């Protein structure tokens, strides 16, 4: 009798699992493609609870260029992606983005007008801003005993094997261009080759070229200096209060990461529903507090804790922002940028 009851219990469990599997198979699968560690996963669960007809399939990428390759390859049906400003322009110019139906995104009303109708997407035809920020230098005050106000410190020989550069073509080349006094959007071959030579000269000083792992590495005092995004610097500070962040005097990049619907999407309306959900005030606040990145959302700014709202690392003053440039879409000279970066990185790999 006992064995029979156990058998019946197992049968019930199996049937239940089958029913659940069947229910999941009936749901619309919404493919979301985002940067690594760039969303509070609990908001995805909440979206699924509020939209029981949708199952979110969440994937991550490491760079705009990686994302571009996957989206253009057509191997996956991404419904929502999170490209940066210059990549939004490139995808739109190549006809790879759906125009958004703003009737399906009423929470767009909460996006600060300072961050709408930007040069990379006039009229917000294709994108909604998700976060924004700057690139600068994070440094450990116990390991650096001089003022940090210039990109030039990244070429100081006393920090040999004691600094991290970002493993990003646009960001690292931009640092060199700015230090040389050029625009970070330079298309001049001579200027770019000067930047290449500067980065090659820097290689003996670089501990490694890094990505998201820079947060933990800097918090653990694995290096004195690093090129980072300001949100990463804020997370470093939370782990190690000896970390400070500065936008160098030569200027830097102000960037915007956005939500878009690629033409690979087979569920545009559901994708717009997800974007609208991410713009909802309570969700935007929860996500911002988890991310530690600046928000373009007016309600978030009103409700965010003062320690974050008034922190110059996250929200620089107008003087600092006036020194910053947006990245342009440089796809017309991409082969040149690829060559410059390859010549920097190939030598670094051989050392």
Image: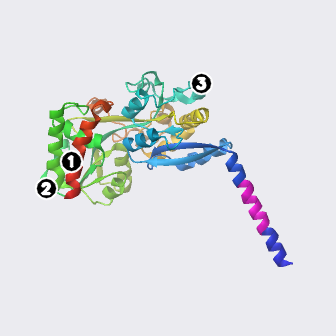
| Left or right: residue 105 compared with residue 69 | right
| Left or right: residue 141 compared with residue 104 | left
Q: CA distance from mark 3 to mark 2?
A: 57 Å
Q: Quadrant of the C terminus?
A: bottom left
| Number of other residues with Cα within 10 Å of mark 2, as a class: few under 14, some 14 to 19, many 20 or more | few
Nearer mark to the viewer, of 2 and 1: 1
Query: Residue 333: x and y, percent?
Result: 27, 32
| Number of other residues with Cα within 10 Å of mark 3, as a class: few under 14, some 14 to 19, many 20 or more | few
Dot 1 or dot 3, earlier in sequence: 3
Colour setup of the view: rainbow
Query: Tag on residue 154?
Result: none
Classify mark 1: helix, strand or loop.
helix
Mostly what secondary structure, the magenta segment?
helix
Q: Is residue 184 visible?
A: yes
Q: CA distance from mark 1 to mark 3?
A: 47 Å
Q: Is residue 272 above or below residue 211?
A: above
Dot 2 or dot 1, earlier in sequence: 2
Image: magenta residue range:
10-20
Query: Residue 274: x and y, percent?
Result: 57, 37
Q: Quadrant of residue 184?
A: top left
Classify mark 2: helix, strand or loop.
helix
């Amino acid at each position: 009798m006992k064995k029979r009851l156990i058998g019946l219990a197992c049968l019930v469990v199996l049937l239940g699992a089958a029913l659940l599997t069947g229910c999941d198979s009936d749901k619309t699968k919404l493919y979301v493609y985002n940067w690594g560690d760039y969303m509070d996963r609990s908001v995805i669960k909440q979206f699924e609870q509020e939209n029981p007809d949708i199952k979110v399939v969440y994937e991550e990428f490491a760079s705009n260029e990686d994302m571009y390759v996957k989206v253009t390859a057509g191997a996956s049906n991404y419904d929502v992606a999170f490209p940066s400003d210059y990549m939004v322009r490139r995808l739109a110019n190549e006809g790879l983005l759906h125009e958004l139906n703003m009737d399906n995104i009423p929470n767009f009303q909460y996006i600060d007008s300072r961050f709408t109708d930007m040069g990379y997407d006039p009229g917000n035809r294709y994108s909604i801003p998700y976060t924004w920020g700057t690139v600068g230098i994070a440094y450990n005050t116990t390991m650096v005993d001089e003022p940090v106000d210039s990109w030039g410190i990244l070429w100081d020989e006393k920090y040999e094997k004691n600094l991290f550069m970002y493993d990003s073509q646009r960001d690292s080349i931009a640092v060199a261009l700015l230090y040389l006094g050029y625009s970070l959007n330079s298309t001049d071959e001579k200027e770019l080759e000067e930047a290449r030579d500067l980065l090659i000269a820097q290689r003996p000083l670089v501990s490694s070229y890094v990505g998201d792992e820079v947060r933990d590495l800097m918090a653990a005092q694995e290096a004195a200096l690093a090129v980072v995004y300001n949100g990463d610097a804020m997370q470093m500070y939370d782990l190690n209060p000896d970390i400070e962040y500065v936008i160098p005097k030569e200027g830097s990049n102000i960037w915007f990461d956005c939500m878009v619907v690629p033409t690979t999407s087979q569920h545009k309306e559901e994708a717009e529903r997800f974007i609208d959900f991410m713009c909802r005030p309570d969700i935007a606040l929860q996500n911002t507090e988890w991310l530690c990145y600046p928000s373009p959302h007016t309600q978030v700014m009103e409700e965010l804790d003062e320690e974050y709202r008034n922190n110059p690392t996250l929200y620089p003053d107008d003087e600092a922002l006036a020194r910053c440039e947006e990245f342009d879409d440089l796809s017309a000279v991409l082969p040149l940028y690829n060559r410059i970066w390859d010549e920097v990185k190939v030598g670094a790999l051989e050392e």
